[in-house]
């Protein structure tokens, strides 16, 4: 029988840069990620799309036309593309979010 429950505690952290780490389960070109950001994350522009939910902390996302602050319970929906490029910044020591999307 296929495992339908994701046990994030049993998945190793991946850390592509300082201040950003995640645990991910991937299947058929899709992924579910538990992500943690800290204030150590270097500023960088991202053009990937994101669909998720902020679990803990406060997160600022800068866009070309302004800044939005996300708090626990907020959903996040950012389409892919240069016109939606964004730069995230942890406003609290740790920010936790869950994101779904393509690998």
Image (cartoon, rainbow, N blue to C red):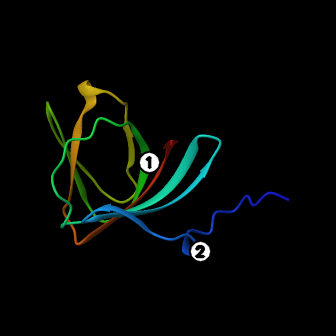
Q: How many residues crowd around disc 1 within 10 Å: few (fewer than 14), some, or many (20 or more)?
A: some
Q: Quadrant of residue 47?
A: top left
User: Residue at label 1?
Assistant: 52
Which disc, if any, is residue 88?
none
* Mark pair 1, 2: CA separation: 21 Å
Question: Which residue is tagged 2?
Answer: 10
Percent across and percent down for residue 18 are 24, 65
Where residue 58 appears, as percent x and y from the top left, is 26, 61
Query: Is there a contact, CB below 8 Å, between mark 1 and mark 2?
Result: no
In the rendered image, residue 75, in percent from the top left (x then y), is placed at 41, 47
User: What is the crowding at mark 2: few (fewer than 14 residues within 10 Å), some, or many (at least 20)?
Assistant: few
Query: Residue at coordinates 22% horizontally, 68% vertically from top-left?
Result: 92
- State whether residue 66 is above or below residue 56: above
- Seen in the picture, residue 74 relative to 37 is either above or below; the reply is above
Q: Secondary structure at mark 1?
A: strand
- Give the camera-side residue of 64 and 10: 10
Residue at 30% from the left image edge and 65% from the top image edge: 57
Mark earlier in primary sequence (1, 2): 2
Between 90 and 3, the one nearer to me in the picture: 3
Q: Quadrant of residue 82?
A: top left
Instruction: Tell me the residue at 37%/51% (across/down).
Output: 74
What residue is drawn where x is 24% and y is 34%? 85
Mark 2: which secondary structure? helix
In front: mark 1 or mark 2? 2
Tell which residue pokes out farthest to the right in this image.
1
Is 28 on the left or on the right of 67, as rendered?
A: right
Picture coordinates of residue 50, whole percent (x, y) = 40, 41
């Amino acid at each position: 029988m296929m495992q339908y429950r994701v046990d994030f505690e049993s998945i190793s952290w991946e850390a592509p840069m300082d201040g950003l780490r995640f645990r991910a389960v991937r299947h058929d070109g899709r992924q579910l990620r538990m992500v943690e950001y800290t204030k150590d994350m270097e500023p960088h522009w991202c053009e990937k799309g994101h669909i998720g939910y902020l679990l803990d902390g406060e997160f600022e996302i800068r866009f070309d036309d302004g800044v939005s602050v996300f708090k626990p319970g907020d959903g996040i929906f950012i389409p892919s593309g240069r016109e939606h490029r964004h730069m995230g910044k942890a406003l609290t020591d740790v920010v936790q979010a869950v994101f779904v999307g393509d690998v």
